[in-house]
Image (cartoon, rainbow, N blue to C red):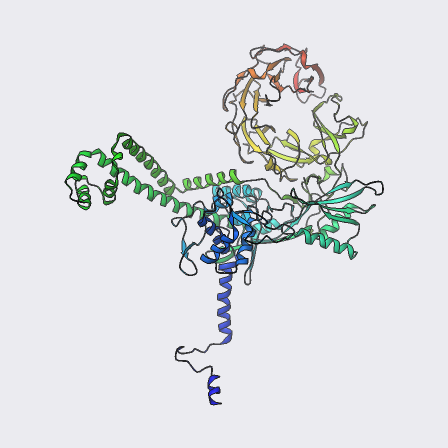
């Protein structure tokens, strides 16, 4: 019994344990829990603000880099990658590592996946990925370019792995702010992070703007980065939550799915039905679970009006069809879907990340600044490393050149030397070279003393000297360093940038254009969504301040025709009333300048002289009755900014994947190219398309192919014909000013810009008309093809000094007449309209004066010309 009591005496010290120190339980628990919490925070749950990665993701990427799984190499089994990560860097469960790897591959989880996968990696229905022995992976291009291309111990710091047998990077040398691009989520102890993903092009634009202006106002920064961009698309509703998140680091962002109305054709035994078709869901919404929730609500009687629901999704995209019962208001059903299901969700943004191993909640500006500071540090270390290598190499090359220049002495030394060490000492003594230079000379093959090799050494020396000078400039001038940083960012933007997937809607107390929309329908609470998932400002007429969002109003798609007149009126008619072509007869003192046979789900993209673009849904244009003689609706009243003149317009299908290009020209002859895909996120507030000086205005905007040409005409009769390729018209950001296209004299202005496509019409002709009524036709290929910045060709001579070119236009096959507006000025209250067949205009060479086509009296002149 005594022996047993002795065994239960826990305070009796054992010889091998030494002294036991008594400690309060609560103090030990507090200390241990704090250590555990910091271990979870730093080593597991939170991303680093510099590269945007958690340790497990960083170790996966580094292990794949060590395995050589580059984008141009074959895929390797995921099991091999997981094994390397577990054995070398991350001693945790294999399934947890594989789950992390899978998320890096999924394009519906990451906006820019840093890994490329081959095999089944799951779906938005929460289907699990195949086992790691079946799937394969490698680094994606953006993962390799942005995170691993510069990795070495001279650029970043390495540390021992868990057992001291390997070295692993503390942080990856990120060239992009990946924390914002892909976002992050994680739950630590007492804190959590939930950073939304963003668009690469927008983030780079914001980063460059912050580099150029560290004191950039938040409003300007938020214009460049207006909202998150989720990989699954949807609509981000900006009711103040985005600005709060970007300003404070915490906010609630509302996301809606994309839904449209369609008519499901019936059969003999079944009538046609209206259906709600959902093509995009909010980020991180499980489609299968969402459909089950709708079915559950219908069965419980909490969601009425739904007759059937089916998932028609396939490899081309998502498509969930919700058929409605007859006599049911579709708007009401859609509203209940938003309120009761995950078709509308809130993303709770918490922008928390590690800064120097300490968790910190940061604003958008602070996150970008963390990346800029880190990139500056890595670039500095990289340039210093390159400078050291170049300096050492130059030292060696100078030694080789010096020795070859004194070849006779070198040969004499080598002949008399007993062994290599004595030869080395003699070379250092007699030739005045260093030890590394002497080693290089002794290792030099005989072929290096040939004339060709000596020239190569001189060329290498010159290249090294230039490289060293450039590196010293970069390291000595912070502005030059930032120039290099911005150049790298622009290159990555051009290579990996894409259009926004998530559209943006606003809730405003006084939404733009609310009064003008009453002319169409007082119940229009939102812009229409098309069946092909195109939408715009879905929340325009919502009363501000409310978190209860209105339903989207959806319309059926129909063929229609819109017509815009010289005086700025617009009208819409069903195409069936005129077989798809609107009449072009002048109405009183007005006449059509554009006729667009289109569909109701398209948009009219308008450009104003102030350098902004606005998207007007075709369905928002007030329709006219079949036999109506109305002039139509003033177009400016349908746009939020009626102060500026409308200079160009086109009908487009909002498509983030389009490869079409816009060319924009200012009145001071600045020209640039802008991808049309950049306008896919346009909202009711419009977009700035060109940076203009105070005395400059936007003159023209239009679609021009890369293999086309463009002709720009001036009042002096000069026309510059130039190629429209990337070299002559480079692609620039929306806020860029552009490059000089045509050199303008003080007394002349631009008259016209004409896209030329000789592949479609090899015999393309131009029409030239002067203010005093002279006109001619000119073969376009007679114009000299010149580079941007040239003076162009003189294409019209004038009878007197008071005359000038008033119009120039390219003749399309469907043009048959030319309409002339004759008056004392462009705003003459009583102008007259004349129509002349185009074939009656004389065909003349460039030096022709044209022929008078109209008799003018007094101060009358031609003030406008239009091809009909």
Residue 617 percent coordinates (x, y): 70, 36
Is 556 located above or below residue 64 in the figure?
Answer: above
Residue 535 percent coordinates (x, y): 68, 40
Left or right of residue 559, residue 743 in this image: left
State which quadrant residue 396 falls in.
top left
In the image shown, does 745 or 671 lie closer to the viewer?
A: 671
Is 359 located above or below residue 430 in the figure?
Answer: below
Identity of the residue drawn at 40% across and 78% down? 19
Residue 866 percent coordinates (x, y): 67, 20
Image label count: 0
Residue 846 percent coordinates (x, y): 56, 13
In the image shown, does 356 or 316 lie closer to the viewer?
A: 316
Can residue 136 be seen in this snapshot? yes
Can residue 857 be seen in this snapshot? no
State which quadrant residue 778 falls in.
top right
Q: Residue furthest bottom?
A: 1
Q: Which residue lies furthest to the front in this view?
A: 133
Q: Residue furthest right?
A: 269
Q: In which quarter of the image is the C terminus?
A: top right
Left or right of residue 616, residue 352 in this image: left
In the image shown, does 328 or 404 lie closer to the viewer?
A: 404
Identity of the residue drawn at 52% across and 25% down? 741
Identity of the residue drawn at 78% across and 43% down? 274
């Amino acid at each position: 019994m005594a022996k047993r009591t002795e065994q239960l005496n826990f305070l009796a010290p054992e010889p091998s344990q030494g002294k036991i120190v008594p400690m309060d339980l609560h103090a030990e628990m507090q200390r241990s829990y704090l250590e555990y919490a910091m271990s979870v925070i730093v080593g597991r749950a939170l991303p680093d603000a510099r590269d945007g990665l958690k340790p497990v993701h960083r170790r996966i990427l580094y292990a794949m880099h060590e395995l050589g799984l580059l984008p141009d190499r074959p895929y390797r089994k995921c099991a091999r990658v997981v094994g390397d990560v577990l054995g070398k860097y991350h001693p945790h469960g294999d399934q947890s590592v594989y789950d992390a790897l899978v998320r890096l591959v999924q394009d519906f989880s990451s906006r820019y996946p840093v890994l490329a996968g081959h095999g089944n990696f799951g779906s938005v229905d929460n289907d699990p990925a195949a086992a790691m022995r079946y799937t394969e992976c490698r680094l994606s291009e953006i993962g390799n370019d942005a995170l691993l291309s510069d990795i070495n111990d001279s650029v970043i710091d390495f540390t021992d792995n868990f057992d001291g047998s390997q070295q692993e990077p503390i942080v990856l040398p990120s060239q992009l702010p990946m924390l914002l691009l892909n976002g992050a989520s994680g739950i630590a102890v007492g804190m959590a992070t939930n950073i939304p993903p963003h668009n690469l092009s927008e983030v780079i634009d914001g980063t460059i703007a912050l580099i150029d202006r560290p004191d950039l106002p938040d409003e300007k920064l938020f214009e460049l980065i207006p909202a998150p961009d989720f990989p699954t698309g949807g609509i981000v509703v900006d009711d103040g939550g985005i600005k709060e998140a970007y300003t404070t680091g915490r906010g609630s962002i509302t996301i809606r799915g994309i839904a449209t109305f369609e008519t499901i054709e019936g059969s003999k035994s079944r009538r046609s039905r209206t259906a709600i078709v959902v093509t995009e869901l909010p980020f991180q919404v499980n489609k299968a679970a969402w459909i089950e929730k709708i079915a559950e609500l219908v069965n419980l009687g909490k969601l009425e009006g739904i007759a059937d629901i089916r998932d028609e999704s396939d490899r081309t995209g998502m498509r969930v069809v919700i058929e409605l019962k007859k006599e049911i208001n579709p708007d009401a059903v859609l509203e209940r879907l938003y309120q009761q299901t995950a078709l509308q969700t809130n993303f709770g943004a918490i922008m928390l990340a590690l800064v120097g191993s300490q968790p910190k909640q940061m604003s958008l500006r602070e996150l970008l600044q963390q990346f800029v500071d880190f990139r500056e540090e890595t670039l500095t270390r990289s340039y210093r490393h390159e400078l050291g290598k170049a300096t050492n190499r130059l030292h060696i090359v100078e030694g080789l050149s010096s020795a070859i220049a004194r070849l006779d002495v070198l040969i004499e030394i080598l002949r008399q030397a007993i062994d290599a060490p004595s030869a080395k000492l003699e070379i250092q003594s007699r030739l005045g070279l260093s030890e590394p230079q002497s080693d290089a000379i002794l290792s030099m093959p005989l072929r290096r003393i040939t004339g060709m090799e000596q020239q190569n050494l001189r060329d290498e020396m010159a290249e090294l000297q230039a490289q060293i000078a450039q590196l010293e400039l970069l390291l000595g001038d912070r502005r030059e360093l930032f120039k290099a940083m911005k150049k790298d960012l622009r290159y990555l933007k051009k290579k990996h940038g894409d259009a926004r997937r998530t559209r943006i809607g606003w809730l405003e107390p006084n939404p733009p254009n609310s009064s003008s929309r009453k002319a169409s329908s007082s119940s229009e609470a939102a812009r229409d969504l098309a069946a092909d998932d195109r939408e715009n400002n879905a929340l325009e007429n919502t009363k501000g301040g409310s978190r209860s969002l209105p339903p989207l109003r959806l319309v059926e798609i129909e063929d229609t025709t819109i017509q815009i007149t010289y005086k700025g009126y617009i009208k819409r008619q069903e195409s069936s009333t005129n077989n798809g072509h609107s009449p072009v007869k002048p109405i009183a003192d007005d006449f059509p300048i554009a006729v667009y046979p289109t569909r109701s789900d398209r948009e009219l993209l308008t450009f104003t002289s102030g350098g902004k673009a606005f998207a007007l849904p075709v369905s928002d244009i007030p329709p006219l009755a079949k036999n109506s003689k109305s002039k139509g609706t003033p177009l400016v009243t349908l746009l939020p900014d009626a102060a500026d003149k409308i200079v160009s317009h086109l009908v487009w299908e909002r498509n983030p994947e389009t490869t079409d290009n816009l060319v924009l020209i200012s009145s001071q002859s600045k020209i640039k190219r802008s991808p049309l895909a950049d306008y896919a996120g346009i909202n009711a507030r419009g977009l700035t398309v060109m940076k203009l000086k105070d005395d400059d205005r936007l003159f023209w905007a239009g679609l021009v192919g890369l293999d086309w040409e463009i002709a720009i005409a001036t009042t002096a009769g000069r026309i510059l014909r130039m190629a429209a390729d990337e070299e002559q018209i480079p692609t620039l950001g929306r806020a860029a000013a552009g490059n000089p296209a045509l050199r303008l004299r003080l007394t002349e202005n631009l008259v016209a810009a004409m896209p030329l496509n000789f592949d479609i019409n090899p015999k393309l002709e131009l029409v030239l008309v002067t203010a005093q009524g002279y006109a001619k036709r000119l073969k376009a290929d007679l114009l000299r093809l010149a580079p941007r910045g040239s003076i162009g060709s003189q294409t019209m001579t004038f009878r007197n000094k008071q005359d000038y070119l008033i119009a120039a236009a390219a003749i399309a096959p469907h043009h048959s007449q030319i309409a002339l507006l004759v008056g004392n000025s462009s705003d003459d209250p009583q102008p007259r309209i004349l129509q002349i067949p185009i074939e009656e205009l004389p065909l003349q060479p460039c030096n022709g004066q044209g022929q008078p086509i109209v008799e003018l009296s007094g101060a009358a002149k031609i003030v406008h010309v239009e091809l009909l």
